[in-house]
């Protein structure tokens, strides 16, 4: 029987807003690391093993202004072995590395080479890449109206495990309507 956890005892987690590594005429540049860490998810539970962006779950919030070009280098610093069971019996996964990632910005109007297609996956330090891999730094033009989007792993055949492990975060496009 599982323990009964008392509700509403932990403060609501406010996701940290990510600070850019560089800003300039070419856009705003971020580097985001995917890595394993431990975090308490309830005061009465021990720390939980997670994968997250910048050692956070949920990952840090990226905020952009409408029309601001944002560039992100998503860095896979994860181990070679998944801590959840990987089913390699479909999508020809038996020939792919067990741990691979590719980040998709859900709801973004983005060019194909920055969309995070399932076959654009990559492993730790870009040692191996999928057939659709095109670039290490993704570019988001943010030309659409203000919106609350989210980013998440999207790698072929393993998305559900990587998101369940913690690879998800928020992305907000702000526009004049908000003011």
Image (cartoon, rainbow, N blue to C red):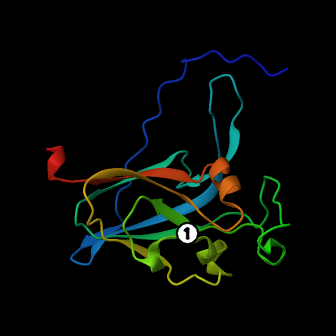
117 with respect to 18 (left or right): right
Q: In the rendered view of the protein, which quadrant contains the C terminus?
A: top left
Q: Which residue sits at x=66%, y=72%?
A: 124
* Residue 27, position as x, y percentages in the image: 27, 73
Q: Count numbered badges in the picture.
A: 1
* Residue 136, position as x, y percentages in the image: 50, 79
Instruction: Work out whether residue 54 or residue 27 is closer to the camera in this orientation and state it.
Output: 27
Residue 64 quadrant: bottom left
The image shows residue 6, relative to residue 175, as above or below, that is: above
* Residue 161, position as x, y percentages in the image: 70, 54
96 with respect to 150 (left or right): right
Residue 125 quadrant: bottom right
Instruction: Work out whether residue 54 or residue 174 is closer to the camera in this orientation and state it.
Output: 174
Q: Which residue sits at x=54%, y=18%?
A: 8
Q: Which residue sits at x=27%, y=62%?
A: 144
Q: Secondary structure at mark 1?
A: strand
* Residue 14, position as x, y percentages in the image: 42, 36
Q: In the rendered view of the protein, which quadrant contains the N terminus?
A: top right
Circle 1 Cα neighbour tier, 10 Å, few/some/many (<14 / 14–19 / ≥20): many
The image shows residue 163, relative to residue 89, as above or below, that is: above
Q: Which residue sits at x=48%, y=24%?
A: 11
Residue 152 quadrant: bottom right
Reading the image, the residue beneath label 1 is 75
């Amino acid at each position: 029987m599982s323990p009964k956890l008392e509700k509403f005892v932990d403060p609501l987690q406010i996701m940290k807003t990510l600070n850019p590594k560089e800003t300039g005429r070419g856009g705003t540049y971020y580097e985001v690391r995917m890595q394993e860490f431990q975090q308490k998810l309830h005061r009465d539970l021990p720390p939980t093993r997670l994968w997250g962006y910048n050692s956070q779950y949920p990952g840090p919030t990226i905020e952009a202004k409408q029309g601001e070009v944002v560039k992100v280098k998503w860095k896979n610093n994860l181990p070679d072995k998944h801590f959840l069971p990987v089913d390699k019996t479909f999508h020809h996964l038996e020939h792919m590395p067990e741990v691979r990632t590719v980040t998709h910005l859900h709801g973004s109007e983005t060019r194909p080479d920055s969309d995070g297609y399932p076959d654009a996956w990559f492993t730790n330090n870009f040692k191996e890449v999928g057939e659709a891999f095109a670039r290490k730094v993704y570019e988001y033009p943010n030309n659409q109206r203000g919106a609350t989007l989210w980013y998440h792993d999207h790698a072929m055949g393993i998305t559900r495990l990587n998101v369940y492990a913690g690879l998800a975060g928020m992305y907000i496009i702000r526009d004049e309507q908000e003011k």
